[in-house]
Image (cartoon, rainbow, N blue to C red):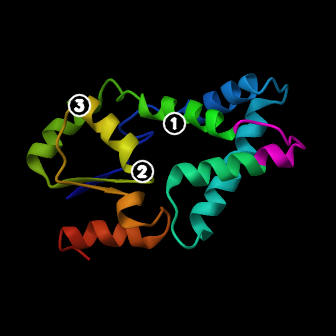
Amino acid sequence: MLFFDAFRTLFDTFDTHTDAARMILAHEKLDFDYIEFHDKWDELIVERWRTDEPFRLLWPIFEDCLKDTFESYGVDKYDSAADIKIWFDLVAAASPFPETAAVVEPLIKKYRTAIVSNSDNVEMKLCLDRLGLEFDAVFTSEDVRSYKPRQEIFTAALSHFDAS
């Protein structure tokens, strides 16, 4: 069996988060270094993934962390709903890497395969529809109610294939 991550593995989102930070700062007419802003935002997101209880969906976490990032910069007026939509739209439109189908399709025919991803279902479905390949299973953080690197999402995937 083979497990794949989705974003940055099958789908090209390498610059998506930094692009979103740049676009959000432009939308808010703020002149901060977008790389530093991104890094702070990302740091808060990763910490929340590791510690957030009870489970919450990804996009509300992203938005809360965005608010915390703005506030750490002393910004108290912003449109976080419109800002987070900028990032969501970028992620939901992510294209597969040019070689994804050619590499993954033969593996799908030979092995049992699954995607294990820190994502909500809506953006995963949009991206998988664009890819056009059928995996044996897809495990999103939304379905499993856990984020990587926590073990629950991996345990669910392994249990599905009777490999726990």
User: Callout 2, which amino acid?
Assistant: Asp
Residue at the bottom extreme of this rendering: 164
Front residue of 81 and 135: 81
Which of pointers 1 and 2 lies earlier in the amino acid sequence? 1
Examine the image and state in which quarter residue 49 appears. bottom right
Range of residues picked out in magenta = 69-79
Asked whether residue 105 is drawn in magenta, I would say no
User: Callout 1, which amino acid?
Assistant: Phe
Residue under label 2, please give it. 120
What percent of the width, then of the height, locates residue 30?
A: 83, 27
Residue under label 3, please give it. 101
Please give the name of the residue rendered at 21% of the width and 29% of the height, measured from the top-left corner. Answer: 102
**Mark 1 and mark 2: Cα distance apart in space:** 11 Å
**Mark 3 and mark 2: Cα distance apart in space:** 22 Å
CB of mark 3 within 8 Å of CB of mark 2?
A: no
Left or right side of 23 for 98: left
Q: Nearer the viewer, mark 1 or mark 3?
A: 1
Residue under label 1, please give it. 88
Q: How many marks?
A: 3
User: Callout 3, which amino acid?
Assistant: Ala
Residue at the left extreme of this rendering: 109
What percent of the width, then of the height, locates residue 150?
A: 49, 69
Q: Nearer the viewer, mark 3 or mark 2?
A: 2
Asked whether residue 70 is drawn in magenta, I would say yes
Which of pointers 1 and 3 lies earlier in the amino acid sequence? 1
